[in-house]
Image: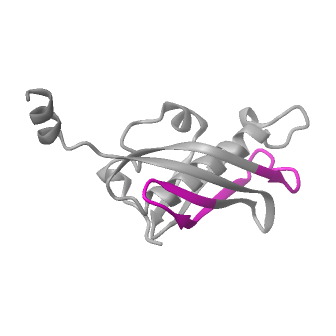
Amino acid sequence: MTAMDLSKGLPFPIEIPFLHDLGVEFLGMADGEAQVAINLLPRHMNSWHVTHGGVTMTLLDVVMAMAGRSLYPDAQGGVTVEMKTSFLQPGGKPGSRMIAKGKAFHQSKSMCFCEGEVWDGDKMVAKAMGIFKYRKRIDPVKKAEHEHS
């Protein structure tokens, strides 16, 4: 997998403010694989002072969608159809860094089946499987021709 140069734009066709607010860092996506990371802050914690499960699930959802999207170069974006997550142990504490890794393992014409893991150092925090549906980009010229015909 090669790292994506974010200076050329986001790895999504639109800006996702929620991910920006969380502090999600895009490490790369290519060939059915993707990685993202987050440096944990006190605001990411639950009442037990470990990473909130919603943060962990967000990382899994994003990294799996990116892994699948890397196989659909014409995709405008993807929609999560289904996601199952197993939490294996508590997530990190403030000051640690969690890395999410995603991999696509089966695809059809418009859907992709993916798996993902979130790691806190050498500890796997959670594992997930997901199904994502991808939409193709609409060629603006063809769209305009269709609307005027």
Residue plotted at (12% across, 33% down): 144
Residue 22 x, y percent position in the rendering: 60, 37
Residue 118 located within the stretch drawn in magenta = no
Residue plotted at (79% across, 37% down): 45
Farthest front residue? Answer: 149
Q: Is residue 65 visible?
A: yes
Residue 42 x, y percent position in the rendering: 75, 36
Residue plotted at (41% across, 50% down): 11
Q: Is residue 104 left or right of residue 134?
A: right
Q: Is residue 99 left or right of residue 72?
A: right
Residue 67 x, y percent position in the rendering: 52, 60
**Quadrant of res 3:** bottom left
Quadrant of image for the C terminus:
top left
Residue 147 against residue 24 in the figure, above or below: above
- The magenta stretch spans which residues? 85-114
Residue 47 against residue 91 in the figure, above or below: above
**In the depicted view, which residue is nearer to us: 6 or 139?**
139
Residue plotted at (55% across, 32% down): 18
Farthest top residue? Answer: 148
Q: Is residue 86 left or right of residue 69?
A: right
Question: Magenta region's main secondary structure?
Answer: strand
Residue 38 x, y percent position in the rendering: 63, 49
